[in-house]
Amino acid sequence: MSEILLAARGITKQFPGVLANDDVSIELRSGRTLALLGENGAGKSTLVNVLFGLYQPDAGEVVIKEVVSLAGPEDAISRGIGMVHQHFQLVPTMSVVENIVLGAEPSRRGMVDLVEARERVLELSSRFGLEVEADAIVEDLAVGSQQRVEILKALYRDADVLILDEPTAVLTPQETDHLLSVLKELTAQGVGIVFITHKLREVQAVADDIVVLRGGKVVGTTTPTETDQTGLAEMMVGRSVVLRVDKAQATPGDVVLSVTDLVVDDDRGQRAVDGMSLEVRAGEILGVAGVEGNGQRELVEAITGLRRTLGGSVLLSGKDLTSGSPRTVAEEGVGHIPEDREKHGFIGAHTVAENAVLNRYHRKPFSIRGLLQRDRIAEHATKLVEDFDVRTPSIETTVATLSGGNKQKLIVGREFSDDIQLLIAAQPTRGIDIGAIEFIHQRIVDQRDAGVAVLLVSAELDEVLGLADRVAVLYEGKIVAVLDVADADRERIGLLMAGASA
Amino acid sequence: MNRRAIAGGFFLLVIVLVAISYGIDGLQTTAVLSGTVRAATLLVLGALCGMIGERSGVVNIGIEGQFLMSAFVAFTVTSMTGSLFIGVLGGIGTGLVLGWALAAMAVGLKIDQIIAGTVINIAAVGLTSFFFDRGRSLGTAKYSGIDLGPLADLPLVGTVFFSRPPLTYLALILVVVVHIALFKSVWGLRTRAVGEHPGAVDTVGVDVIKLRYLNVTIAGGIAGLGGAYLALESVGTFSRGMSGGRGFLALAVMIFGRRTPFGAYAAALFFGFTTALQSQFQLNSTFDIPPQFVGMLPFVVTIIVVALSGMFGSTRDPAALGQAYEKG
């Protein structure tokens, strides 16, 4: 066996109310890829943050060739650990070279030597087959290129261990393939890689060793050949899981949502939705696939009244809802599971009961002559908590203290318990555990079967392919293709997502 | 057309206008332009202070208070020691202390930055009024002009640029130094990065908090120099509230100059020109209206210019401006 580059021994890390890591041990050898597999909240990110010196463990040791205590990331970096964070740590307004050398700039008398910096970046880029445009401004680059900049940033600091935290979450399938081949090249040159993910397919493709975490504990150590995807999923969740959603053939009815030539700008005033048209019928799920940032958010916000439309129209069963206020839209029977639930989904400081009627508190029976009817609200909330399996100590608990999955189930319950004709579900299962995902998927299908039109927007291609009846592919603010899900294979959709013509 | 070409064309236009004006009335033109440089010096020092803070992600609306307090200390120290130089050091020292105080509140304690700056402004007004001794005088002549040899004998520009008192030269040198430091040095790269994305700087092992402390403190020192300039070179005495809103005007200058030193100096000259012009109008009684209205000129122009620059695609603010840094 090759040399051990990095090891964690008995790491325990306590956060207020959560034991994030409980006696976790892992070992990484040079030239190998170790996949850390686990659900959100299993403790993967905590563990690597400890290994990178961002958190100090309460117990246990970090071993980088010898036992070390890391005071901060600078310690980890100087010992050859590099990390590619889930949210890129790049300065968007600066060039690729500036970003790579930041903090370790080649300099002469205090002045940055950009010529030498550029040479070293290009040398690394060709050595590891990581193409980047050295002088481009980072914010102009595609996400995949930004990620290569992050990897180069670590390599520039002579990292022989590379930690990647959910590196594929933001990539198209083709970009993912490219990343995986880059990682193979890196391990061939002796770099050790810790690869965090909850996607089983990638683990099978890239890992040499697998460590599965659940509830802060190591629940299994295995290899891709020993355990298949179903086995890994069971280890992750702790029980057997259904990876596919059971659903019957859709029976589409009349057109419910009709969007025509919609034009919307993003927060920076750039065109985000650029003359988009789509239709969703009663009793079908239209899935919108696309790399994040291609207008999904703006589309959803425009339909639900959260963002101004600059052109085009939105019709709901023939009624004009263009630029309606969020309340008008909701009153017409549109349910909305928002992408950013912390911001648009609930009020964290308010109770479960209050949040359960957030879309209806002003109407009978919850409000009479301007006064809230606490009893009615409590009744409704109690029923909702039961029906949607929201795990909360009581309905008087503030929502902020619930887990992501339970917050989401509360939102789903609230949006479903009114009579709706259209459901807009944006990233409905982002950041929640597999149990809650299964539950929410099933409820969305139930709504469809009850005749609701569903517009599903998700960055997870697997989710779109698993739930949708038709798939619309979004690229740069336009629908580039609408496919029946039976004709939609990953390869083809991936190319469309990257801008290839249909 | 690119911005550089527009700026160049504009610069040429200004030179032509000045030459015509000098041809018509040399004395008045020289007076107005000298006043322009005098007013611009204070504004650009304030703008440099604000710029270093904002490039690091910290808003400094306490420049007004930093000016006022430093002017007071510079005046008092000179009055007691008889030395202008020690007075200037006193002013800079006061600025450094106030810069550090702003950093301690805004960066260390993570108090809202606007409130932290306001605290400094209020404290400066209160303290300087309380300790101000009406009978005290500077006890020595204020800084006078230094002729730069034959350059000073040139018509117009000789008087306007090459026979100025020392702190004016120092301010000009600082404009160049801050430009090089911000855009060429290691410190500058990190400073600009910390204002855009402090997390990126932290994860490569540079201490965000320490860097912001340092920068806001140094910036305070520059504002302190501005205060000393005001008391010891521009006016030659201290009076209550003598900064007169120019610390705020400096922020407008900074924004109009796109948070670059040269841009800020150009903007400072423009605002300085409106100030000098209104004094000359008042002196000559050019307009038959109450002097208060003429005195409004610089402020009316500020409102118009800032509103217009906002309309025509001004620069983007540093992304992390105004936010305290939380790890993780």
Image (spheres, grey):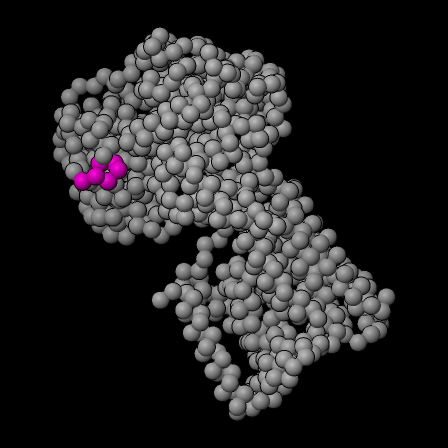
- Does residue B120 appear left or right of residue B206 in this picture? right
Residue in the picture at 72% in, 65% down: B228
Q: In this view, does A90 lie above or below A356?
A: below
Q: Can residue A298 be seen in this view?
A: yes
Q: In this view, does A269 lie above or below A472?
A: below
Residue A288, quarter of picture: top left
Residue A453, quarter of picture: top left
- Does residue A317 appear left or right of residue A83 in this picture? left
Split into 4 quadrants, where in the image is the N terminus of chain B?
bottom left
Residue A74 horizontal/vertical position (percent):
58, 33
Q: Does the magenta stretch include residue A497?
A: yes
Residue in the picture at 64% in, 77% down: B162
Depth check: B105 or A461 in front? A461
Depth check: A212 or A252 in front? A212
Farthest residue toward the bottom?
Answer: B24
Residue A413 horizontal/vertical position (percent):
35, 25
Residue B301 horizontal/vertical position (percent):
51, 72
Depth check: A81 or A415 in front? A81
Stretch in magenta: A496-501
Dominant secondary structure, magenta: loop
Q: Is residue A243 magenta?
A: no
Residue in the picture at 38% in, 21% down: A198
Residue A167, quarter of picture: top left
Residue in the picture at 55% in, 76% down: B274
- Tell me how many marks there are: 0
Q: Can residue B323 be seen in this view?
A: no
Residue A283 horizontal/vertical position (percent):
18, 28
